[in-house]
Amino acid sequence: MKVAPPFTPALDHLETVMQGLRTGRANPGLVEHIEVESYGTRMRLKELATVAVTDARTLQIQPWDKAQVGIVAKAIEASPLGVMPTVAGTVIRLTLPSLTEERRRELTKLMKQHLEEARVAIRNVREKQVKELKAQKDAKELSEDVFERERKKLQEDVDAAVAEVDKRGAEKEKELLAI
């Protein structure tokens, strides 16, 4: 489904957040956002290492600088992911355990919060654009008919964006609750 450009940042952010939700299947998005204190600054893991999926439950992380292996492993340990890394030479392996039913429910609840945040962001964009349209109408730059037509089109775009959020949420919920 094509979503209007003003709403794509909200959907892109939602997609990034959803990738970080652990589903029991290995996914590089689970660890790419983890921040690592490296070279005197905080960097995301994807800026320091290659992350690959070796099988359904295992991620392999290979830092480009061999001296960073221990630092990266500690950052993963400290992350809320809840997985202990295994260091084998210059490679870090993460084996993801199966999710418990309780953890699946917690993740579903968290996902629903993120979905609502995306909906709010979309509505905020709508409010901003309606204000701009009203300002143009008040300045006599838009006629009443054009204003109403644009407002109606904007609402259709909002409805399409919210439908996309709901669709992505349903897909992720199905993935989370699958055993």
Image (tube, grey):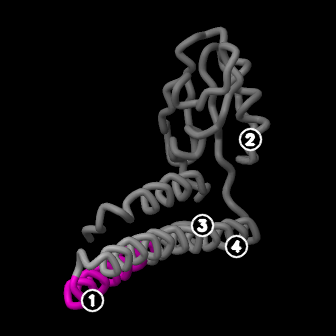
Disc 3 element: helix
Do residues under tags 4 and 2 come within 8 Å of each other at their CB atoms?
no
Judge from the rendering whether residue 113 lies leftward or rightward of residue 144; answer left or right.
right
What element does badge 4 sit on? helix
For mark 2, give the secondary structure: loop
- Badges 3 and 4: C-beta atoms under 8 Å apart? no
To which residue does mark 1 refer?
A: 148
Q: Label 1's element? A: helix
Q: Is residue 13 above or below residue 157?
A: above
Residues packed near mark 1 inside 10 Å, few (<14), some (14 to 19) or many (20 plus): some
Span of residues in magenta: 143-165
- Distance of label 4 from label 1 (alpha carbons): 43 Å
Q: Please tell me which residue is depicted at 38% across the width and 71% down the height of the picture.
A: 132
| Amino acid on which the number 4 mark rests in the picture | Arg
Question: Is residue 83 or residue 72 the one in the foreground?
Answer: 72
Label 2 Cα neighbours within 10 Å, binned few <14 / some 14-19 / many ≥20: some
Residue 47 can be seen, yes or no: yes
For disc 3, the marked residue is: 114
The prevailing secondary structure element of the residues shown in magenta is helix
At which x and y percent is residue 59? 56, 37
Give the mark nearest the N terminus, 1 or 2.
2
Residue kind at label 1, given as amino acid type: Glu
Q: Sort mark 4 into few (<14), some (14-19) or many (20+) by Cα contacts within 10 Å.
A: some
Mark 4 against mark 2, which lies toward the viewer? 2
